[in-house]
Image (cartoon, rainbow, N blue to C red):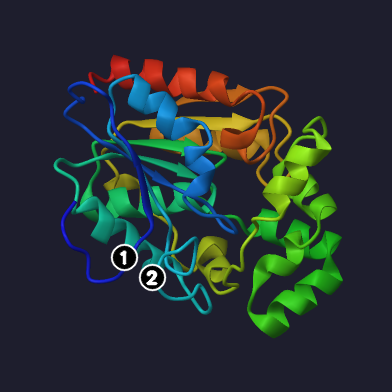
């Protein structure tokens, strides 16, 4: 990769033989980092001939800077910098906030294709934000005071409610909950309505995946996202928000791989 102006943690898995011409760039959601993709998805797609890369946004993982006061445009700049180092325009595969960033990237720069997993809808996430505040009002006060939304997920029980299925083994939950990171509160303003994607400007093919047990985004919101882009849509049963870490992750990965082949990628 080319030299970047700041240090970004970039986890890459490449195939043993010749790679497909189009690389994959994975963009994580809030409160986590590139590692969520390296558990399963990066090796899975490298084994199928794709150069698969995942970045940690500023203030996440070992990347430079801090997430404090970060807005969507700040994170979008991170994605754009890393995407420009790749040998060809990538497919962007984004989860949650990362899915929102993928949409904003495609709006501004174009993309070979988009895959959105449990993504913030293009219509915004005001309903989800207000629901979370109503359920956790004291945590909302803490988040506002610190401008840090980690308060919403600072125990394994909260992490399970928001991110993981009821059937995830406790030891696995504890391991993932221990890796939850600080996250800016200001980006919530953007996804609430201040900086929504301009859907009409996005010409890339889109695949939408949702999780039936997701407590952040409803199945209706997942289907609305797909309708906005006239996209193929799959809602997977027995999975929660962090789809790439759930026991059914391979089902989601298989759908993505088949769709990429159907797009000639």
- Residue 192 position within the rendered picture, expressed as x and y whole percent measured from the top left: 57, 63
Residue extending furthest toward the bottom: 145
Q: Residues within 10 Å of mark 2 (few under 14, many from 20)?
A: some
**157 or 63, which is in the foreground?**
63
Number of on-image labels: 2
The residue shown at (64%, 74%) is 148
Residue 137 appears in the figure? yes
Q: Is residue 201 above or below residue 69?
A: above
The residue shown at (84%, 51%) is 157
Label 2 to label 1: alpha-carbon separation: 5 Å
- Residue 23 position within the rendered picture, expressed as x and y whole percent measured from the top left: 25, 35
Quarter of the image with the C terminus is: top left
Corner quadrant of residue 125: bottom right
Residue 230 appears in the figure? no
Pointers 2 and 1 in contact (CB under 8 A)?
yes
Corner quadrant of residue 217: top right
Q: Is residue 19 above or below residue 110?
A: above
Task: Tell me the SS state at disc 2.
Answer: helix
Q: Which mark is residue 77?
A: 1
Is 263 situated left or right of 54 in this image?
A: left
The residue shown at (48%, 69%) is 59
- Where is mark 2, residue-wise? 74
Task: Tell me the SS state at disc 1.
Answer: helix
């Amino acid at each position: 990769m080319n030299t970047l102006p700041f240090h970004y943690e970039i986890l890459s898995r490449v195939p043993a033989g010749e790679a497909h011409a189009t690389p994959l760039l994975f963009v994580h959601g809030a409160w986590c980092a590139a590692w969520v993709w390296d558990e399963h998805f990066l090796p899975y797609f490298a084994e199928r001939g794709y150069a698969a890369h995942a970045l940690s946004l500023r203030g996440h993982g070992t990347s430079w800077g801090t997430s404090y006061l970060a807005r969507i445009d700040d994170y979008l700049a991170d994605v754009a910098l890393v995407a420009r180092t790749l040998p060809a325009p990538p497919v962007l595969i984004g989860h949650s906030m990362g899915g929102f960033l993928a949409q904003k990237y495609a709006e501004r720069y174009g993309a070979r294709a988009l895959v959105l997993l449990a993504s913030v809808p293009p219509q915004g996430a005001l309903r989800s934000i207000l629901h979370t505040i109503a359920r956790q009002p004291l945590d909302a006060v803490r988040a506002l005071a610190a401008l840090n939304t980690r308060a919403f997920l600072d125990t394994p029980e909260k992490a399970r409610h928001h991110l993981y299925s009821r059937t995830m083994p406790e030891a696995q939950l504890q391991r993932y909950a221990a890796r939850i990171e600080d996250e800016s509160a200001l980006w919530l303003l953007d996804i609430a309505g201040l900086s929504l994607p301009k859907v009409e400007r996005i010409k890339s093919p889109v695949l939408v995946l949702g999780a039936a047990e997701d407590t952040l985004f409803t199945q209706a919101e997942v289907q609305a996202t797909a309708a906005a882009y006239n996209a193929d849509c799959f809602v997977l049963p027995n999975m929660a928000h962090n789809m790439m870490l759930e026991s059914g992750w391979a089902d989601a990965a298989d759908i993505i791989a088949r769709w990429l082949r159907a797009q000639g990628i």
